[in-house]
Image: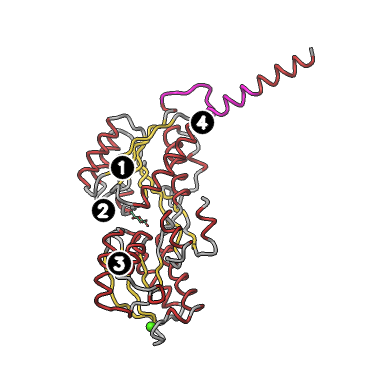
Amino acid sequence: MRTKKILAAGIVFCMGIQLFCACGRSRPYETDKVYVGVAYYNQSDTFLNQLIACLKERLQEYGEECLETSILIREAAGSQRTQDDQVKELIDAGCNVLCVNLVDRADPSEIIDLARENDVPIIFFNREPVAEDMMQWERLYYVGAFADQSGIMQGELAVELIQSDPFVDRNRDGKIQYVILEGEAGHQDAIIRSENVVETLKNNDIEIEKLSNGIANWNRAQAQNQMLQMISQHRSKIELVLANNDDMALGAIDAYEKLNYTESALPVFLGIDGTDVGLEAVRDSRLAGTVYNDKEGQAEAMAELAVALVSGKGLEDIDFQDERYIYLPYAKVTKSTVDDFIKR
Ligand code: BGC
Ligand code: CA
């Protein structure tokens, strides 16, 4: 008799847990289904492909833990007009929250109008709209990272290397001759990273001399071409290559490989992102270091926010900056710490 009672109590307790797990509701409502529409600027972007893969995973986990989730993804091949059409298509398909990585971060009005007419909230990510546009409607959010921090950290990595290894200054003139490979013009991360990395070197009393800079639009092949031109112009004078992201740092390395430079004649290369290929290159000492752009953290923040916006629960637990922004911190990666990042 007594065991039966304990058993019965146990069953009731378990049911209680199950009900509780359904996000505090006793049965799922239509709005308990989270249909996430993702629109991103270009499928050739290494970092974004990895970030979106993380987002898929996280949403799937939410689906298993709590609410039903599904995700529909569109890439715009670099055209804002295409993306505007895709957002309409995603809304027509029934998405009840959007994650938008704008093609042109200064041109979100059409997308905002569409979302507002249909009352579908938007989480912008990675390509930050300007502040005035974020004020167009109260259901607009942004998830990204502190661009200035990534530039400062890349600068600190460079300072540490230069101070610990006299061979970085290959011609021993007391100055570091450097080139910069930049992301898209107008992208917050390109402008701010380039400014901050140089500032950090100067603030640490490193004498530097800029030989050249080139825009390679985050792209490995374009960076290789830019680097080939820079090498033909400056030959072995280049001592440090600062790239706004890992793909461009790898493109620069490709250029030197193509020209059959020996290892001892290579400059120092630094990237940003910690993509899979970037981390491998740090592990193999081809890249001297990178700065980790926390895609897992950003994906988690986006998934949590998407679920909260649709279910109407949990928004108060989210730690916003300026009410609607979430910024994840960067982290420095060197050969001695790279294994911790590869495991993530
Ligand atoms: C990343 C780049 C990426 C770009 C796309 C940046 O934050 O560092 O790798 O290409 O975002 O918008
Ligand atoms: Ca020098």
Separation of marks 1 and 4 at Cα, in angstroms: 25 Å
- Split into quadrants, the picture shows ligand 1 in the one at bottom left
Q: Is mark 4 on a helix, strand or loop?
A: loop
Number of marks: 4
Q: In this view, does 310 lie to the left or right of 105?
A: right
Q: Name which residue type carries label 4.
A: Cys
- Where is the N terminus found, in terms of image quarters? top right
Q: Name which residue type carries label 2.
A: Ala
Which residue position holds label 3? 258
Where is residue 141 shown, x and y percent of the image?
Answer: 38, 45
Q: Residue furthest left?
A: 81
Which residue position holds label 4? 66
N-terminal of the pair, mark 1 or mark 4, is 1
Separation of marks 3 and 4 at Cα, in angstroms: 51 Å
Q: Does the residue labelled 4 lie within 8 Å of ligand 1?
A: no
Which residue position holds label 2? 106
Q: Is disc 3 in contact with disc 4, using a CB cutoff of under 8 Å?
A: no
Alpha-carbon neighbours of circle 4 within 10 Å: few (<14), some, or many (≥20)? Answer: some
Separation of marks 2 and 3 at Cα, in angstroms: 37 Å
On the image, which quarter does residue 175 sit in? bottom left
Q: Closest to the observer: 124 or 133?
A: 124
